[in-house]
Image: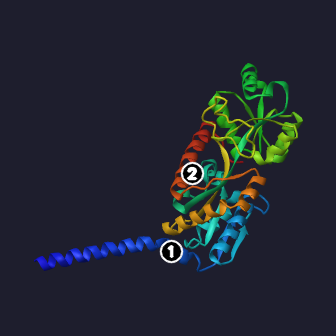
Amino acid sequence: MQTLRRFALIAAAGALAALTTSAQAQPDDATRQLAQERFTIVAPFPPGGPVDLLSRLLAEALQKRYGQPAVVENVPGGAGNPGMDRVRRARPTGHTLLVIPAGNLTINPTLMTNFPFRIERDFAPITMLAKAPNVLVAHPSSDTVTLNALITAMRADPKRFSYASPGIGSGLHLAGELFRQQLGLDLQHVPYKGTGPAINDVIAGVVPLMFSNLPAALPQVRAGRLVALAITDSTRSPVAPDIPTMKELGIDGVVVSSWYGLLAPAGTPAVIVSQLARDATAALSTDSVTRQLTAQAMTADPMTPEAFAAHIRAETATWEKVIKARGIRAE
């Protein structure tokens, strides 16, 4: 009996040692697996924008890290859905990845009646890559010099004010709706076909206000053609540290940024996802990437896969409430 007990203890110790060794070896196993074939980074929008830039920065980093070709595949059209489908159907090995804006993950599931994906079912979140805060900008008239002056004027004459956006259901439209909701204002929304036309009409005084992403608005602010009243992020932007946050000015609950994430197909092993998150974080921390992001008024904001998945869920819940409360539907 003692011999059997001794044998069982030895066997259990051996199994525990094997499990420990296996767990310790997993990151190395992930590195070996990722180094076996080429990478495809799917960017569901045309070349030239933030999604394309981030995809190319990531492709360069993965190619250098693993010694395998890494190509960017632009799949424009269909509000990003064809590119997302391309990744959803890919083999879950970590070699086909998706770089995507926040709205495709957190707004479109509620906004689109027949949205073809369930994010948690179809994709494995890896990390947030970068973000650019949104900023409330105004035509530089006498009562829009500060946010408090603007709010006072809006409460006195609510029908006088409206805000522009790049289109119905865009993140910037919903930022305006969240602002209106938090302050109990009756602001009229004026949708445009794109950010450029909307900003031009605010500069011209046709529409007094707009929530814009910081990269698009900052040159106009610096030129004096627009006034930046507040950014909608939790902290000031290092790109424009002189612009206060909404929270600093006494408005809670309006924390919205334009961010971009990295995802893999569902079923990608957790150890591969974690390794890719580490690789992306390392790439985002280099001086070269920091300079390129700063030039676009963006900052790196990597996080763990678990934190990124939780962030997607929380923001989806926020936008679901806003969209349903206002009855907003995609055009």
Label 2 element class: helix
User: Is residue 17 or residue 86 the one in the foreground?
Assistant: 17
Name the residue furthest top.
Answer: 156
Is label 2 or label 1 in front?
A: 1
**Residue in front for this viewpoint, 162 or 68:** 68
Provide the residue designation for mark 1.
28
Percent position (x, y) of residue 224? 87, 37
| Residue 147 on image: x %, y % | 73, 29
Q: Quadrant of residue 56?
A: bottom right
- Asked whether 67 or 45 is in front, the reply is 67
What residue is disc 2 on? 312
Q: Count the numbered circles shown.
A: 2
Residue 240 versus residue 209 in the image, above or below: below
The quadrant in which residue 62 appears is: bottom right
- Can I make out residue 269 in this image? no
What amino acid is found at the position of numbered circle 1 in the picture? Asp
Please tell me whether residue 249 is drawn above or below residue 268 in the rendered image.
Answer: above
**Residue at screen point 62% across, 31% down:** 182
- On residue 331, the disc is none
Residue at the location (59% across, 70% down)? Answer: 89
Q: Which residue is situated farthest in the left direction here?
A: 1
133 sits left or right of 126 in the view: right
